[in-house]
Amino acid sequence: MNETLHYLLDLLDLERIEQDIFRGDSHASVIPRVFGGQVAAQALVAACRTVPEDRPPHSLHSYFLRPGDPGAPIVYTVDRIRDGRSFTTRRVVAVQHGQPIFHLSASFQAHEEGLEHQEPMPAAPDPETLPRAEELMPKYRHLFFHEDVARLVLEARRAIDLRYVAEPPFATKGEPREPRSQVWFRTNGRVTGGHDNPAVHICLATYVSDMTLLDSVLMAHGRGGWTTGDVVGASLDHAMWFHRPLRADEWLLYDTESPTSQNGRGLARGRIFTRDGKLAVSVIQEGVVRVPRGAS
């Protein structure tokens, strides 16, 4: 396990400060707020800590209420809503400076046998044939609104090996394309030891799920995103359904599309497939997508 992955796993290893109350730290941020995927993943970790390990999460629904302060710890309070024979429900509120910044509801289920089907995995090149994000970013450094942005973006993602299937939105500014994006991702290193359990892998996938989901919205309008300064964005709500087991340290294909954007908001849908074609996760998010005043 490399140093950057170890740091991310430590970030998700919350401190228990009281019964059903946990505290987590934050990444140093490239923007003046906490990364949404981090808050969602930490909140899910807090919920998982109150549920037996043989009952993994099958869905979450969440709202981002206020920007998080990356310089302050976040306190997560878990409400044990229901413990049923097959399903368990938890509610988590994340608080900073005395105010809620994030709200999550999660449902957990014991394994059951049942009917099975899924849509097929979309075509995508093998991840080994694609450049790593850190190899790709310098090529487009001239498009970023500040010379340090590319470096800071890479630092924020340093625990994740992320590979774009096609050119990312910041590379195609001004050129509208089909509102669809694909990335392969896995952790930069193997998850081992006490961290290697199904809940951790689900929480790591939750962390990554907020990284590129709104790219498909940007594609439709030829916008580069906040990195190029032509869009202001933030996650509003985020929902995930966990269908089948996954390992976050093995290649996962994140296929996303945007059916609509309007009124300063964009909607994106995502599917996460294992490399052997199993549909592991479905994701839906709506986010703020605003054009700054004065931007063309």
Image: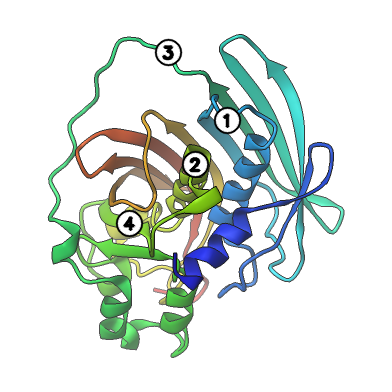
The residue at 39%/82% (across/down) is 144
Q: Earlier in the sequence, mark 3 or mark 4?
A: 3
Instruction: Give me the C-alpha separation between circle 3 and circle 4.
Output: 29 Å
Q: In the image, which is nearer the foreground, mark 4 or mark 1?
A: 1
Numbered label attached to residue 112 = 3
- Image spot of residue 160 (x, y percent): 40, 63
Amino acid type, callout 2: Asn
Q: Where does label 1 land, which residue?
A: 53
Instruction: Give me the C-alpha separation between circle 4 and circle 2.
Output: 19 Å
Left or right: 258 as drawn, with respect to 20: left
- Discs 2, 1 touching: Cβ within 8 Å: yes
Q: Nearer the viewer, residue 277 or 171?
A: 277
What residue occupies the far front of the structure in this picture?
A: 193
Q: In the image, which is nearer the foreground, mark 3 or mark 2?
A: 2
Q: Earlier in the sequence, mark 4 or mark 1?
A: 1
Amino acid type, callout 3: Glu
- Relative to 149, does residue 280 appear above or below in the rendering? above
Q: Quadrant of the C terminus?
A: bottom left
Instruction: Give me the C-alpha separation between circle 1 and circle 3.
Output: 15 Å
The residue at 33%/77% (across/down) is 134
Q: Earlier in the sequence, mark 2 or mark 1?
A: 1
Amino acid type, callout 4: Phe
Q: Earlier in the sequence, mark 4 or mark 2?
A: 4
Circle 2 SS class? loop
Instruction: Give me the C-alpha separation between circle 4 and circle 1.
Output: 25 Å
Left or right: 14 as drawn, with respect to 270: right
Circle 3 SS class? loop
Numbered label attached to residue 185 = 4
- Image spot of residue 182 (x, y percent): 25, 53
Q: Earlier in the sequence, mark 3 or mark 2?
A: 3
